[in-house]
Amino acid sequence: MKYLRLEVLKLRKKTRSWLGPILVFWLIMLAYPLTIEVSPKNLEIGFFSVLWIAILLSMMFATEDIFTEDYNDGYLEQSLISETSFSYLVGLRVLIHWLLIGIPISLLGFVFSLGTTENLSLSLLILPFAMMSSYIFLNLFVLGNSLSLNKGSVLGAIITLPMALPVLIVLGKSITAIQLEINYSGFIFLLLGSLSIIIVTIPIVVSFIIKAHLE
Amino acid sequence: MFDFAFNSIGEAIYMNGHGIYVWSVVILVLISLLSFFIGYNLKIKKLKKKFNESN
Amino acid sequence: MFQVERAYKFILYSSLIIYIVSLIWGLLFTQEDFVQGNSYRIIYLHVPASFLSQSLYISMAVASFVYIVWRVKLAAYLVISIAPIGALTTFIALTSGSIWGIPTWGTWWQWDARITSTLILFIMYLGLISLHSSFSNYEKADKLLSWLAIVGAINIPIIKKSVDWWSTLHQSASITLTDKPSIDPSMLYPLIGSMIGFFGIIISLVIISSKYQIFLREKNKSWIKEYV
């Protein structure tokens, strides 16, 4: 509980770190209509692809400096030797990033899709899909950024994006399924299953990687 | 099984218009393999030279 | 080390002979394909490379596992020696495939499952190489590289499956270990020969690049001074 409050405070104090990704998401969603001839039909064709990619990119920016500062000021080293398990701390930090960045972005995506498509059930379903995918992306980017710690986010992105592609494929397929009114619950379970595996494994792997950095 | 598939060398190079694709792939593969071999050999030679100088 | 040198020469020269003989056989002495015409002859260059591109990644992941668990230093050298060679084979597979695509599909690029996953594999190789090169501390770079190789190896089947599911157009594999091959024997033998030859060439490339890696890392040790 103590750590939870500490982590929330740390993220909230760095306004750029939590507001920045949300603004990036907003700007991408705003830029998309500007690139095409505006008509409701045109807008709907590419909207969901842009939405997923915008979520992906904003999650990338959200995790850009997730460990850098703590690495530089020695906090990581200190928490490695503390009695609380380090992977637990990593998982907590990801969770807080999701709560403060992932959920607002998912809500924003929902609002944007309300304005784009007239299919209300589709827009409503965007919400759980966006929430799950943003959590998965956050975890993946945390992994990439832990590998490329203090070497910039470009390297982390190169490493992580290939891993994120299957999630994008699932998201695209599920949108098609919803639009064609085929049974889509399988996709939700698929995402949920992979999310539950990722939530457990990635913090453990990340803690090993950060140990390798500090050795 | 071991008959020459073409009537002449020129035909073998041309391959009914597909020769340019086939032979460009051949050249590409040979050049890339060769450049790796040469590159590593040069690097090793450089390192060896350094050893000899430092000894 | 001297035995390795001899083995290296043996592997290199014998596989070169096998490769060149089966290439000449395949390119000039086999029948023209009924459907694809002469352009099918690219198979003798394309299939060996695409066959190895994934196996190299898997072998890299195995070496990484050995390094992470048992701390064998040589395994770490092997990992970073294989990475550029894996990238090379993947590059050969990609470019030869897209050149092959021009006469057969009429386009050099198709958004088809296997090509796309090979492209992703290529990017993953480049990511590995750039990760390793961005750290000046070799030991740290080795550890991080090994972790990434293992995570990537877990991901490869997932990526492959999902991309397969996303779309597929490519002709299915001509040679599988279980089924009867769907290719004429007169075309099959040179193909097998070129695969064996290419495999040997890649092995000798891996040997020479690990030799370079060992020289680079152990340059301050006394045994290497005696050896040189």
Image (cartoon, rainbow, N blue to C red):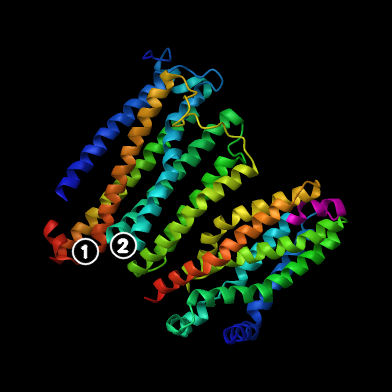
Query: How many residues crowd around disc 1 within 10 Å: few (fewer than 14), some, or many (20 or more)?
Result: some
Magenta-highlighted residues = A37-48
Q: Is residue A43 magenta?
A: yes
Q: Secondary structure at mark 1?
A: loop
Q: Is residue C23 left or right of residue C36?
A: left
User: Subunit of mark 2?
Assistant: C
Q: Main secondary structure of the magenta part?
A: helix
- In this view, C47 is above or below A184: above
The C terminus of chain A lies in which quarter of the figure?
A: bottom left
Q: CA distance from mark 2 to mark 1?
A: 23 Å
Q: Give the residue at x 81% y 53%.
A: A44
Q: Position of residue C155 (x, y in %)?
A: 52, 53
Q: Position of residue B8 (x, y in %)?
A: 41, 14
The image quadrant that residue C47 belongs to is top left
Nearest to the eye among marks 2 and 1: give it: 2
Q: Amino acid at mark 1?
A: Lys
Q: Are marks 2 and 1 on the same chain?
A: yes
Q: Nearer the viewer, residue C178 or C6?
A: C178
Can residue A66 be seen in the rendering of this structure? Answer: yes
Query: How many residues crowd around disc 2 within 10 Å: few (fewer than 14), some, or many (20 or more)?
Result: few
Q: Tag on residue A102?
A: none
Q: Position of residue C174 (x, y in %)?
A: 49, 29
Q: Amino acid at mark 2?
A: Trp
Q: Give the residue at x 25% y 38%.
A: C11
Instruction: Give the residue pinned by disc 1.
Output: C219
- In this view, C167 is above or below A134: above
